[in-house]
Image: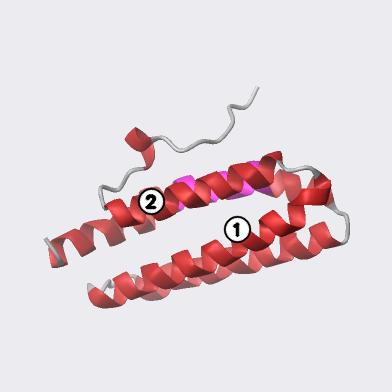
Amino acid sequence: MKTEFAWNDEVHSLNLPEMDATHREFVDLLIRAQRAADVELLPILDTLLDHTRAHFEHESGMMEACALGSRTEHEAEHRRVLAELGQMRTRAEKGRFPFVRAYLAEGVPDWFRNHLATMDADLAAKYRRAFP
């Protein structure tokens, strides 16, 4: 049986309070979307998309501020995820809930864990060095 995805400070914290708070909000919204009844899913997906856009824009500002060398790759990953979330929203609008739920249960948590451990960890480390 798969364990429900949840925020874990020991695993997910990057030791940048603002970044950690944004990531925790993302996880909370994802969990709300995972648990939502079909009739509630679209508004929650809209909120998740809005949050994720703002989250990624903030990280882009951090990347610029600390001259992150991998900024192009990191932002491309953000664009890909936003496009996928948009596609899932369209699928939910068309009633393709099982497909959307599989993405929310498997795809997003897997992406988040990997992205956090690699690209976001790199950004956090560079940002801390630039702004001690």
Q: Secondary structure at mark 1?
A: helix
Q: Disc 2 versus disc 1: distance between alpha carbons?
A: 15 Å
The magenta stretch spans residue 65: no
Indicate which disc, 2 or 1, sits on the residue closer to the N terminus: 2
Which residue is denoted by mark 2 in the rendering? 21
Residue at left offset 68%, top offset 57%: 45
| Front residue (pair 50, 4) | 50
The percent position of residue 90, horizontal first and vertical second, equals 78, 65
Residue bounds of the magenta highlight: 104-115
Q: Quadrant of residue 70?
A: bottom left
Label annotation for residue 2: none
The percent position of residue 33, horizontal first and vertical second, equals 67, 47
The percent position of residue 72, horizontal first and vertical second, equals 40, 76
Relative placement, left or right, of 89 versus 9 is right
Residue at left offset 18%, top offset 59%: 128
Which residue is denoted by mark 1 in the rendering? 48
Please name the colour scheme applied to the rendered image.
Answer: secondary structure
Q: Quadrant of residue 3?
A: top right
**Does 103 sit above or below residue 58?**
above
Residue at left offset 44%, top offset 72%: 57
Q: Amino acid at mark 2?
A: Ala
| Front residue (pair 62, 120) | 62
Q: Main secondary structure of the magenta part?
A: helix
Circle 2 crowding by C-alpha within 10 Å: few under 14, some 14–19, many from 20: few
